[in-house]
Image (cartoon, rainbow, N blue to C red):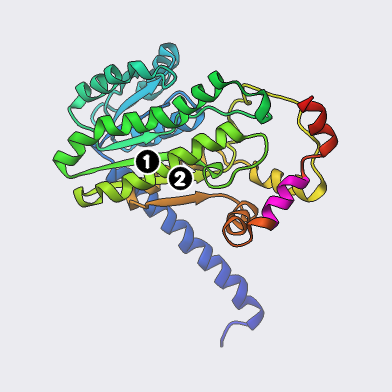
Amino acid sequence: MGLPSVTVLPLLIVVAAGIYYIYNEVLQFMSKSLVRNKVVVISDAVSGVGAECAHLFHKGGARLILCGTSWDKLESLYDSLTTDADPRETFAPKLVILDFSDIDSMEDVVAEVMECYGYVDVLICNSSMKLKAPVQSVSLELDRNIMDINYFGPSTLAKGVLPTMISRRSGHIILINSIQGRLAVPFRSSYAASKHAAQAFFDCLRAEVEEYGIVVSTISHTFINASEPPQVEEPVPKPNALAAFIASQLTHGVRPSVLANEIMQTVNRKRKEVVLAHPIPRVALYLRSLLPPFLFAVLAAGVKDSVLGEQMQ
């Protein structure tokens, strides 16, 4: 006697959920095995996303080179990774001080990174400086600083590891960018400009090094909800309802652990481009290409003329 039709759908849902769970577990297991013995550089390992990546790749048996601006934070991360770790399954990380705001030091940093193992399999560029302010309040010095950290630093580090990748005809460079590298919104001028520049650089790099077997990936995400607040906070106009809704969606964040898992999957599947965003930001990206006047009008509507005029006086 067959099952009643009313029970078929719930049963199918349960079976499908079970298959999906098993599939994800198998993928995670395979992901860890695929990075074993790989030399992985994380440019900002002391950030929330960087630390999550460090734990994932360390458990997977990768040879980590952890970079950051604070030696104390790097040592703390080192202790958290190595405490209770099985030395037969994992490698003790190497630590390197890296500060993209000091571009003159990059030659020495690249040399120190290369001295660790002599080559790099995976470079994860996740360093970033955030900025929220009206255009007229941002100084040239601050513009240059954010460009150093978000563009010149990652591009210089990528250039530094390229020679050995080309000679070995193998390697993977990953830029952890922002959705604002594709879509600029008000009061993020310097930040969006730096992210657009980084996106363009790594898009060009992808095509140039493909013949050498090198993969270049970009991950564009929305706001990371565990990150620190912007360094410059200025009073901004109160947007209208539609603009406020879009802005809230553009900044609806992803957790560091979710982004770290996406980075691991990108490494293993060699995906060239990933957009980690909710539906509204994705729609805004399409509008930017297909109906730019409409998107411009919506964004402009979020800036009240009276308040902006007062700021410009």
Q: Secondary structure at mark 1?
A: strand
Please state the horizontal and vertical placement of residue 60, each as a whole percent of the image. 32, 38
What residue is rendered at 70% in x and 57% in y? 294
Residue type for callout 2: Ile
Q: Earlier in the sequence, mark 1 or mark 2?
A: 1
Q: Position of residue 25 (x, y in %)?
A: 41, 52
Q: Is residue 166 visible?
A: yes
- The answer to whether residue 38 is left or right of residue 242 is left
**Magenta segment: does it hold 298?**
yes
Can you say which quadrant of the picture contains the C terminus?
A: top right
Write down the residue under mark 1.
174
Query: Would you say 308 lies left or right of 11 here?
Result: right
Q: Determine contact: label 1, label 2, CB under 8 Å.
A: yes
Q: Is residue 87 left or right of residue 167?
A: right
Q: Which residues are magenta?
A: 294-301
Q: Which residue is mark 2?
A: 219
